[in-house]
Image: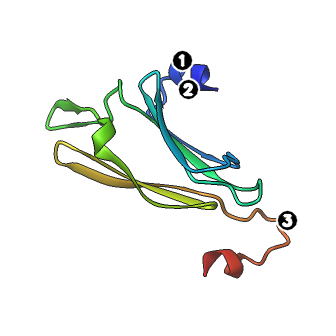
């Protein structure tokens, strides 16, 4: 999956049902990968952020993220919130796992 992520030159990818046993942060091929832990083998979110490509352009200049500028600010099996800061750019990105239309769970249980 990482090879395709790099070939397609995706800047940020958010994934659900990652099912990692524990939350983690790792850097592979200049892609920073952050993950929330799964709950009993279910759920789990991940966010992959490319550090080698520009995150955005501000004032005509390419802005790159660094490892130190990316921080997980909230993590649970259904939600991962990451703050990205660089050169006067400060954004939050959310990877969230919501119930699907045939879910047996009431949405209010998840959203409360």
As drawn, 13 above or below 95? above
Measure how far apart labels 2 and 3 are at the Cα level. Answer: 30 Å
**Residues at discs 1 and 2 in contact (Cβ within 8 Å):** yes
Residue 80 relative to residue 109: left or right = left
Residue 71 relative to residue 28: left or right = left
The quarter holding residue 51 reads top left
Residue 43, image x, y percentages: 70, 56
Q: Residue at x 17, y 42 (%)?
A: 87
Residue 86, image x, y percentages: 23, 43
Helix, strand or loop status at disc 2? helix
Helix, strand or loop status at disc 1? helix
Residue 107 relative to residue 111: left or right = right
Q: Give the labeled residue for mark 3.
A: 102
- Neighbor class of circle 2 (other Cα within 10 Å; few <14, some 14-19, many 20+) is some
> What mark, if any, has residue 7 been given in the picture?
1
Q: Give the labeled residue for mark 2.
A: 5
As drawn, 86 above or below 51? below
As drawn, 23 above or below 5? below
Residue 3, image x, y percentages: 59, 19
- Neighbor class of circle 1 (other Cα within 10 Å; few <14, some 14-19, many 20+) is few
The answer to whether residue 34 is seen in the rendering is no
As drawn, 60 above or below 89? above
Q: Nearer the viewer, residue 103 or 80?
A: 80
Residue extending farthest to the front is 22
């Amino acid at each position: 999956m990482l090879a395709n992520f790099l070939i397609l030159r995706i800047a940020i990818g958010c994934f659900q049902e990652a099912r990692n046993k524990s939350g983690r942060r790792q850097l592979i091929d200049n892609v920073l990968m952050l993950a929330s832990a799964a709950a009993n083998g279910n759920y789990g979110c991940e966010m992959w952020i490319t550090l080698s490509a520009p995150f955005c352009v501000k004032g005509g200049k390419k802005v790159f993220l660094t490892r130190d500028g990316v921080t997980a600010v909230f993590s649970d099996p259904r939600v991962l919130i990451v703050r990205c800061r660089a050169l006067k750019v400060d954004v939050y990105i959310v990877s969230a796992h919501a119930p699907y239309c045939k879910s047996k769970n009431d949405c209010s249980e998840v959203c409360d």
